[in-house]
């Protein structure tokens, strides 16, 4: 329980203060993704985009110093274009449509220094989690999209390569998640169904910390729509060994 409390505390701290890494060599790569979106880099490492028309309002903010910025920019571009195209479609109702994207950073295994010294490798993992709110009808929907990079192996991390080979992560993840959701939703009565909880496709959005893997879920993704969107930290000692 102490490990979960520490993980949740770290999560809330990251959500409350969007991490400023301020790294010139990495921000330069991220700037290209911001430029692709037509945004402006502010405060050294934050890309901001805002447009307000009679048909749609879009506001986006995300960190540019995530090392693999192209998939991030491609995803945000796709989300933006979906809203714009829907707003411009003949017969569109409930205008103006709205989309807002915000972000949080999470890290694991990082050294105590707060800058990447030139020529020295940066260790551990970095996760960028995007929170997207879209309202293109008479009700809004919030979803998550995560990106994680493993500096030690210079590769993106997905659910497929998160755990050590030969392990069966769902055998551990499902009961741990069911326990965590029972704790979170005890008073509201939501429970995790085995056929859903054992499906790896529902666990694709996550962030890695030193103590836990934090999974993010949009409405209707793991529980009933009434549960809304939520996150669930699962202590690392309840999971198979990670490959990071």
Image: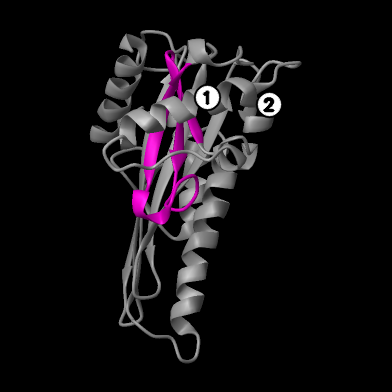
138 to the left or right of 71:
left
Q: Which quarter shows the N terminus? A: top left
211 left or right of 188 in image: right
The residue singled out by tag 1 in the image is 175
Residue 118, placed above or below residue 47: above
Give the mark nearer the N terminus: 1 vs 2.
2
> Is residue 214 part of the magenta span, yes or no?
yes
Magenta segment boundaries in residue numbering: 206-235
> Where does the C terminus fall, quadrant-wise?
top right
Residue at 39% over, 36% down: 231
Residue 135 position in % (x across, y down): 36, 68
At 64% from the left and 16% from the top, the residue drawn is 243
158 displayed left or right of 23: right
Question: How far across and how far down the image is residue 214, in percent?
Answer: 44, 28
Rate crowding at label 2 as few (under 14), some (14 to 19) or many (20 or more) other CA atoms within 10 Å: few
Circle number at residue 161 = 2
């Amino acid at each position: 329980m102490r490990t979960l409390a520490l993980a949740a505390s770290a999560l809330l701290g990251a959500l409350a203060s969007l991490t400023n890494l301020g790294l010139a060599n990495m921000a330069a790569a991220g700037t290209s993704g911001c430029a692709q979106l037509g945004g402006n880099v502010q405060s050294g490492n934050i890309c901001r985009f805002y447009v307000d028309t009679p048909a749609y309002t879009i506001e986006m903010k995300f960190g540019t110093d995530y090392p693999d910025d192209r998939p991030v920019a491609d995803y945000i571009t796709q989300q933006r274009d979906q809203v714009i195209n829907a707003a411009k479609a003949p017969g569109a109702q409930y205008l103006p449509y709205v989309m807002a994207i915000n972000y949080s950073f999470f890290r694991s295994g990082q050294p105590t220094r707060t800058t990447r010294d030139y020529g020295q490798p940066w260790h551990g993992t970095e996760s960028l989690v995007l929170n997207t709110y879209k309202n293109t009808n008479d009700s809004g929907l919030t979803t998550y999209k995560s990106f994680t990079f493993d500096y030690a192996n210079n590769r993106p991390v997905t659910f497929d390569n998160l755990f050590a080979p030969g392990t069966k992560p769902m055998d551990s993840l499902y009961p741990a998640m069911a326990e965590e959701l029972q704790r979170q939703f005890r008073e509201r009565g939501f429970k995790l169904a085995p056929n859903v909880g054992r499906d790896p496709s529902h666990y694709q959005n996550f962030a890695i910390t030193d103590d836990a893997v934090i999974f993010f879920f949009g409405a209707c993704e793991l529980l009933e729509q009434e549960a809304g969107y939520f996150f669930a930290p699962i202590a690392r000692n309840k999971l198979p060994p990670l490959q990071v």
